[in-house]
Image: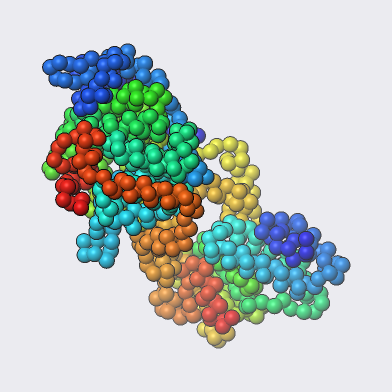
Amino acid sequence: MPLEEEIRESILEWDEDKLIELCCTSLESNEATPEELLKVIGSTMQYIGELFEQEEIFLPDLIGSADIVKKVVDDILDPAIKEKGGERETLGRVILGTVEGDVHSIGKDLVASFLFSNGFEIYNLGEEVPAINFIDKAEEVNANVIGLSSLLTMSMNSQRDVIDELKKRGLRDKYKIVIGGSPTSVDWAEEIGADGWADDAIEAVSLIKKLLNV
Amino acid sequence: MKIKQVEVLSKDEIEAINSASLNLLSTLGLKIDSEDVKKLFIENGAEIDNETNFIKLPESLVKEQMKKVPSSFKLHGPDGSFNFEVNTTSTKFATIGTPVKIYDPSRKSNVRKTVMADTIKQIRMVDSLKHILCSHVDVWPGDVKFTALHAHCIYQWAKNTRKPYGLGCFGKVASQDMMNMVSIVVGGEEELIKNPRLVGFVNPTSPLHLPHIMTNGYEIFAKYKQPTIIAPEALAGISAPVTLAGLLTQTNAEVIGGIVLGQLFNPGAPVFFGTVSCCGDMRTGNSALGSIETGLITTGMAQLARYYNIPSRGPGGITDSKCFDVQNGFERYQTLLFAAQAGINYITCAGTYEETLVEALELLVIDDELVGIVKRALEGVTVNEETIGLDLIKKVAIANKTGSNFLGESHTRKFMKKELYLPKLINRDRRSSWVKKGSKDIIGVASDIVEKTLKEYSPPDLDKDIEKKLLDYIKEVESRSLDFFREAEGIYTKSISMIGTGVELKEDDLK
């Protein structure tokens, strides 16, 4: 079986060990460059995304595949590219987190998986993230987008805090700010001065693609 | 474990009803029109009451004949590629109804009279659905000659589906025509008898009357061993006692009487222990098929069927609503879930509303979804070490990452399709996604599916010679006069009342 097919199968079957082995051996033997492997993985994730859109597969299939791919990219391919002095090609770098005062994670993690599967580089900061941490990380990795999640009416104001803090530091226009979460709305996004709002993970991908023109 | 069957009768209560029904049959008996049927009963130990002219069935006759009834049988499609088993433990789903109108949103009234094109579309839709396994002459083709309707329908069935079919046992001539035509389709009578294709319906007229036209057709269906549903539609308070126990006793006697007759026609003839009984509406005198009492009656009849070890048939997915409102939704789901939880083996009436008088292909698609949901309910909860997933719970809960969840776990992937029913029509989108997709309600979504299914439908190949023979047969049927039927059936009334439609067709209407 050609390498491309083997990689595709290991991702679809969630065979993490096999995917790691395939990537390591082909890098060691110079059969493929890390960039080439990333390309194959990217097209597989695109294929998985299409299957998901067509309702052939469901969330667990997509997330499970994205999880193992993320591990391989972070642990093997990224370091290999950096070792050569290069940088990974990406549609954009996105900082994601649930704002201060809120511990909800699932929706935000779905957004992370969907964005990652679509070729974005994701920095998932977790939950109860203080405003300052979003900004520090964005500055550190030269991010394009900051995504703020909130599932509580009580924590919605923390989304505004991040934007206010960015303004205070004169950094507001450097990043696209997107927000989401059950109690939020497009009106709320306008009110706090965000660049966009998405109702679910699928919409989040198209929103960010639109904002970045990618 | 699987979900527990719903019951409305204790063991003692079943015995009490059985005993009362047998008492009814032996002391009062059945009103029988056909002299031949009377004779057959009497030859086998029944007695005629000279005063009432009823046929009394002694307990010994009933018990002896009930022993011969098969507890399972198979139904096959025209080309034999599709079949399913009906038995006393599983639940299968089908159509049946008497729709003479069909949903048509282009009309102000939202309905219009049905024509053959609708009949064909319904057959094709059922052929395409996952859970609805059998259609019948449900959608009444109003544009073909009444006396040849059965022949036209058999022809269209053979051309347009891989699934079995069914018709009322409406007279010996029509029933024999159907057997002859289906024999042409399947390659002979032997094959038809060995692997049945048709479900027949015999509806006793409550109270305790087996009408002439029905027993005429029933004899043919029994002779060819085509599974026949004996199903009274008694209305509590109108054609049966208002007390549900009284209705169950009376209809049980009607069904037993019908089943005994089938065994006398042909020992081992497959039958369904059926019901479509419901309550009468005490304000209007109308039947109330969507009522909660339908569920109670259906459940009682399911228990009685199990007591006799005969496959049961009952209605589900039925409503008295005249539009697509909340009543339509809750009555159809209430009756469907009741029938399924009662353990009815053949649940019918998918795709209908307004007491089954109106068809909507959209509802047929929705019912297929509801059946999927109900089938999931019947599976219950599977408990074993793997499904409890103790190690998994620990793993996810202590994972070294905040907000870990079960979505990306292989356990989820392995069990999601078995544990969670994933609906096709039910909308769980967030509002903005729903709006983006056109803010459709479930009828709109179902309508899209109907359109796509019919557009992409590919009918089975019917052999050209067979098709020609069927068309020739139809010509022969078309050439008969109504008097021919009256003569043959031994019926000399001036008009024939079409059961279920209330339409009276005079000779002039048929020309």
Q: Where in the figure is residue A156, as x and y percent of width and height?
A: 45, 69
The chosen color scheme is rainbow
Q: Where in the figure is residue B452, as x and y percent of width and height?
A: 44, 63
| Vertical comparison of B23 with B446: above or below | above
Q: In the picture provided, is B50 more to the left or to the right than A153?
A: left
Q: Where in the figure is residue B135, as x and y percent of width and height?
A: 38, 46
Residue at 80% from the left image edge and 73% from the top image edge: A33
Residue at 24% from the left image edge and 34% from the top image edge: B489
| Vertical comparison of B312 with A179: above or below | above
- A113 and A164: which is toward the camera: A113
Q: Quadrant of residue B318?
A: top left
- B284 and A73: which is toward the camera: B284
| Vertical comparison of A96 with B247: above or below | below
Q: Quadrant of residue B28?
A: top left
- B70 and B169: which is toward the camera: B169
Is residue B299 shown to the viewer in this render?
Answer: no
Q: Quadrant of residue B348?
A: top left
Q: In the picture provided, is B437 more to the left or to the right than A167?
A: left
Q: Where in the figure is residue A2, as x and y percent of width and height?
A: 78, 64
Residue at 23% from the left image edge and 17% from the top image edge: B56
